[in-house]
Amino acid sequence: RLDRETSGVLLIAKRRSALTNLQAQFKERETGKTYLALVLGNYPANKKVIDAPLHKFLDSNVERRVRVVAKDDPNGMKSVTLVKVRQASDLCSLLEVTIKTGRTHQIRVHLQSAGHVIAGDDKYGDFERNKQLAKQGLKRMFLHAWRLQVAHPSTGEQLTLMAELPSELDQFIKQKS
């Protein structure tokens, strides 16, 4: 599953048997999912693990939202995100983000809780800054499903599926470098 605004690798099974095998791999966390995200600010290279439970709720507009909660919160679902800085400046940082759990809006909320919202995120981001970024050419959230690692459902062979950044995100990064 990808949020509507997220680009990148999307895996589709042609047969029911392949689907159930792949679903089991995701459920058992036997897959590797790595995203590229551009966040606002200079992300600290030493902040590599975000281990914070997440809780889904409905806001006053009856819109589905997610927030970080205390470790002992009974509504919190264990959520772990690994972060590697790929490129950084004072204005923004390009991150490789690997999720160990697959919670709704996990990357968006974890990075927000770390003080570094995703550029262009209209739900959890910096709305004023997003307006400025749109004028500079970023018309969407900068979150991209870059790499997916799974075992082939029939042969068990380890597969790595990759999708390069879409041209509009690649161009935006090059202009920021």
Image: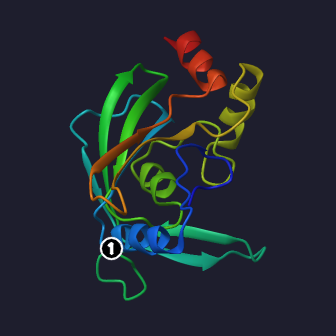
Q: Position of residue 170 (x, y in %)?
A: 57, 20
Left or right of 149 in this view: 110: right
Which residue is nearer to you in this view: 20 or 8?
Answer: 20
Q: Residues within 10 Å of mark 1 (few under 14, many from 20)?
A: some
Q: Position of residue 100 (x, y in %)?
A: 31, 60
- Figure label count: 1
Q: Is residue 146 above or below residue 175?
A: below
Q: Residue at x 39, y 71 (%)?
A: 21
Left or right of 49 in this view: 145: right
Q: Residue at x 50, y 28 (%)?
A: 164
Q: Is residue 50 above or below residue 170?
A: below
Q: Residue at x 29, y 83 (%)?
A: 72
Q: In this figure, which colouring scheme has been used for the structure?
A: rainbow
Q: Residue at x 24, y 44 (%)?
A: 48
Q: Position of residue 140 (x, y in %)?
A: 70, 37
Q: Position of residue 130 (x, y in %)?
A: 69, 35
Q: Secondary structure at mark 1?
A: loop
Q: Amino acid at mark 1?
A: Lys
Q: Quadrant of the N terminus?
A: bottom right
Which residue is nearer to you in this view: 142 or 22?
Answer: 22
Residue most extreme to the bottom: 74
Q: Would you name the residue on which mark 1 appears?
A: 78
Which residue is nearer to you in this view: 41 or 78?
Answer: 78
